[in-house]
Every structure is written in C-alpha cells, then in structure tokens.
Image: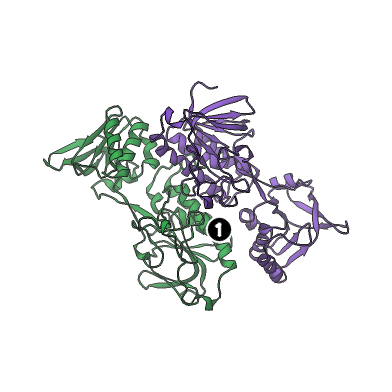
Chain colours: A green, B purple
Amino acid sequence: MPDEPYDVIIIGAGPAGLAAGLYAARDRYATLLLEKNGLPGGQILLTEHIENYPGYETVGGPELVQHMQKQVEQFDAEIAINKAVTGLKRRDDGMIEVDVNDGETTYETEAVILSPGSDYRQLGLPGEDVMRQATRVSYCATCDGAFYRDKHVLCIGGGNTAVEDTLYLATRFTAKTTLIHRRMEFRAQKVLVEELYAKADENNIDIKLPYVATEIVPNAAGDAIDHVKVRNVETDAIEELKVDGVFIFVGMVPNTSWLEGFVPLDANGYIAADPITMKTPTPGVWVAGDCRQDAAMQLATACADGVTAAMGLKEYFRDFPDSESWAGVEPEAIEKDQVRGY
Amino acid sequence: MPDEPYDVIIIGAGPAGLAAGLYAARDRYATLLLEKNGLPGGQILLTEHIENYPGYETVGGPELVQHMQKQVEQFDAEIAINKAVTGLKRRDDGMIEVDVNDGETTYETEAVILSPGSDYRQLGLPGEDVMRQATRVSYCATCDGAFYRDKHVLCIGGGNTAVEDTLYLATRFTAKTTLIHRRMEFRAQKVLVEELYAKADENNIDIKLPYVATEIVPNAAGDAIDHVKVRNVETDAIEELKVDGVFIFVGMVPNTSWLEGFVPLDANGYIAADPITMKTPTPGVWVAGDCRQDAAMQLATACADGVTAAMGLKEYFRDFPDSESWAGVEPEAIEKDQVRGY
C-alpha cells in the first residue's frame, strides 16, 4: 500500500478519465489514474483519424492521447498502467479501498471517478482488427460516416442502431449501402424497419437476409478493404462484396460488471448518475464517459463528463464527513426513473 | 432572404456554437452560424492562455478559435458575423424565422441551436479590460486559480461564489488572498461565511469590509498589475494593494433576454433544457453552452453541449412534421422542477 492515501482515484485513463485527471490535479488534489491497459487512451488509441474533436481539424488518436497525458502529468497526476481494478470497498471511516489485479495492490482514496469506458461489441472476424486500425471498420456512424461520402459501405446488424444508422449513412453520405442481418426479421422497432424498406430504393440500400459476414479481406497494402466475404445462412453460399468500409452495429458492452453492488447499474450495465453533476448515488463516487447511462459516446462529451465529475470534488471535500459519520452509511436513495431499464 | 432555408441555424459562434456547427455540418445539414460580434469565439477570445482544454497542454484562446472555425468551415458550414439575432418566430408550417439586426435580414430554418453564451458581470473599472486580456483579471476561479500558486490575489464580491472561491483560491493556490466587499455583511450563506472566518488566519485571508475597488493599475509594460486602488466606503480612504491577480465574483448574465416567450428561461435568465439531450421544450430548438441552466461554464463542457445538441438533429429530422401539423403547436409541457428558480 502506498505511503499516503489519494484524494481521488480515477479508474480508466481514456479521454474521460484523463479530462477528470486534468481538472482534479490542476485543483491540486492528490490524483491517481489507474489504467488496465499498457497505455492510457482507451478506444481512441484505435482511431487513426479524428476530425470531430473540437479544436483539431484533424488529429490521430494516439497523438491526441499523448497531449492529454502530458497535460495531466504536468499537474502532477500519476498514471499507473496495467492496473485492472478488481474491487472497491468503502470502509467505515469513509475511505474507499481500491483493489487492483486481484489483490496485487490496494490503494486508499477519499473519492473515486469511474471512467472504465465501454467497448463496441466486435464480431471477431478475420481482418476486423487490422481494418479497424486503418479506419475501414467502424462501430459508430456518427463518428465515421463522413469518411464515406459517395462510397459503398456494408452495415451489419439487426437492432435499432443498425437500421437507424444504415438509413443515416445511406441518406447522408454513401453512394451504396448494403445491410446484412443473420435472421430473416429485424429486431429493430417496426416503424424503423418500415422506413428502411420505404427508403431503400431511392437511397440505394441493398438489404440481404439472412446473411453473416465471415471475413474482411484487406488489400495488398493493408490500408483498405479489398472485399468482405458474406455467407447466406440458409444456402451457405459465399459472396464477395466490394466495399469501402464496414459498419458493425451489434451493441456495446460497458466495462462495469466488477462494479455491481458498489454503484447502481442499469439493465445494460451502464452506471446511473445525475446527468448534471455526474454524481452516482454512492457518496464520493462520480462517473464519466461511455460507461455512463445516457452518454453521448463522443470524444468531446466524454471529456466534458470528466471535467464535470472532477469539478464536483470541490464541494465534496469541503464537506467531507469525519470518520465516525460513515459507519453504516447507505448509498443515497436513487429515484426509480433515474435508473431506467431496471 | 436567402434562396433556400437552412436545416439548422446556430445562434452564437462561441465554442458551444462552433462544436454544434461541426457536428451539424459534418452530418451534411445546411448549417448557418450567426455571431453578433465581428469574430467567432465568444469569451475565449479574451483568454490568452488556456491550459485546461483537454488535448492542448496550453493554447491561446484566439488560436483555438481559429482551429475550431476552420474545422467547421471545412464541412461547409457558413459563419456570418455581426449578426445579432433580434427575434425568433415559429410559423404555422413549422419553419422558424430568425430576425437579425432588427429586421435587416430574416433567415428561415427548420431547427435552431441556441448558444448565445453568458457574460461575466464586469465592474467597469479602469484597467479591468486590459488586465483581463493579460490574464491578470479573472472571473472564474476554476479556470484561472492554478495561475496563482503562491501569489497574492484580490477577490471582489459578497455572494456565495465570492466566498466559496476565495476559500478555494486561498486553500489550494495562493500565498495571500485579500477579499473585499462593499457592505459590512456578506450576502453568501451563513455556513460559508462562518467557514471563511474560521479558515482566514491559517490560510492568510485578509477580509476588508466595506471596501470597493476603484482602479486596476497596470505596470509600465502593461503585462501585469502594479497595484489595485481600493476605497473604504465609510471613510473614503484610498489604499493601494500590491497583488498579482484580481478575481471579480459579481455574477453572470446570460445573453437570453431576447428569447423570452420563445423558450422557457429560469429566474436568472438561463435556458431550461433536458441535461441529457440539450432539448428545450420548444420543438426543434436546442441549447448549448454557458447560457444553459446548470451549465458547468467550462470550455470542454460547452463544446460537449454543442455536440450533444447537434446529435439530436438526426432524430428530429427523421420525424420532422409536415406543414399542417404545426398550426397551433404549443411548446411541450415542461416539468416544473426542470425549470428551477421559477
């Protein structure tokens, strides 16, 4: 255990965590960021080309992360990598114990900001990872749609996001959009599916059911897609689709399963919080970024979450209760409608 | 009147408006930003040295604005300067008419994002503006406190923010903090005032009542404060205080008076909105930035507001009602507790 407890420990050093660290450390709180991976940055490390972060006409994800990291460290925040948080416990004196790597280390802190992020659910196809790094496989139409003006993209999925974002891409950007789904029926709301079929012809949307993708084949240089192999689930026939990009819309998974019991999670695993303050119902615990219920899932909004969460420390520390008052403290009551999906 | 209506008009081209413009234009909505001043950028044009915008270790306000402006324009948004919006009217066909410069121009649009910002209330002292530009006069402790480690600052004001942020500066940054207020009693909550007096000695806070500032005198080079003249209101005696910085905490004024009747404003003039979506109760109208109720008043949070507001366009335009359905449409009911301060 380190010599002295931290004022605040930030769990997850993606953009939300780094922004929280910036504000916390600049306010001279003793700040530690714990990152489970070998580098800070989270999802944006996987993005070579960002053009929708306000203030950078265009920037690479790794480059932006480096700036954010330096910025945090210049205010003396510590960033510890390869530290997966495996448990959180509030002691009777109000301190929170943060267990890392299943007992390897225990840190003590007065406050916690949770920014573990969410991961896009991947299909695990051959070629998926390498083409993601080349910005040819995407999981977010708002993020990457603009790269596909007058191009042909393949969309994969059958839920609301798949249908909505296929329409979004087809009506605003692409010359052609192919949508495949592994069943004969979409899971999306009926009104969306009706709209999809109504607008398919005029927007050059090709709907192929029931199909799955089996491989994303890069070109020789490895910087673009040559073709995608798709299989008709009924006939097992394989087709090769020549597309410029692939959008995979099969859901997201917040990295929050280890938090159950410590903060309220909604039915999909997102952390419930006050959208104005980022406060969770657990005193001294805030949330920031893509793991938050109702998060907009954008780089700029994740950073703002972190800023807002860290700004809450000032009030919290002014009133930080003394040791006796914590024995048996329960999380504040949370309004039922604040945790939707329960 | 221009040839064709816009999809969205963004009112105010500060960081919130520019971020909204980026997302709207990148989504290929016909986007117009209206800025009342001769340059986009809003408040941050006045800040020479920003170190708390995630991703820039340090950047000048005007430089950051230039990046944001180029970024928006590369997606074909139009920015029109010297355009003060003087009226908004919803027509029966659902279109919104935007009146500029008291009838000089009328623009038509389907959706509006309101980002007119807020101004810090200034004291209007000689030297205040020029020392603000030199980052020696500030209106925001969270923004600029970190520049005053081990320095002497003068705080001015008597409300909650003045007392809270004097404590914040004195306990975290400064070597000495002088607080002046024009009356013998603070307007701030009693608990804060008690804390102020309890912590004054150990944190070297000098409380001078009843005093007003009369002049901020720059040094010969004009890049720092030489001294501030303050006057004892009872005796009229003038003193000269040698300080490194001045924090003026006398409130904010959202630029929203022209909006009354179009969207709900709270008692302080801030625009009420859903904090998750930035939607106002008026259909097709969003808000972003410092003019929003509960805004965190930071650069990063203003940008995120703009991003979130613009992301709402996608759903809105999918369901944009046809012309007949707008006659007599009233703003959606707003929960009373959504508009606090009414």
Foreground pick, A10 / A167? A167
Q: Quadrant of residue A191?
A: top left
Q: Which residue is mark 1?
A: A311
Q: How many marks?
A: 1
Relative vertical location of residue B250 with respect to residue A196 in this rendering, above or below: below
Q: Is residue B121 left or right of residue B304?
A: right
Q: Is residue B194 left or right of residue B75?
A: right
Image mark 1: chain: A
Residue found 60% across the figure and 52% down from its top? B341
**Image location of residue B322, percent across then percent down:** 41, 29
Foreground pick, A1 / B314? B314
Q: Secondary structure at mark 1?
A: helix
Q: In the image as oriented, which residue stretches furthest toward the left?
A: A235
Q: Quadrant of residue A52?
A: top left
Foreground pick, B176 / B119? B119
Q: In the image as oriented, which residue stretches furthest toward the top?
A: B3
Residue found 30% across the figure and 34% down from its top? A195
**Image location of residue A35, percent across then percent down:** 41, 61
**Image location of residue B112, percent across then percent down:** 51, 35
Q: In the image as oriented, which residue stretches furthest toward the front?
A: B328
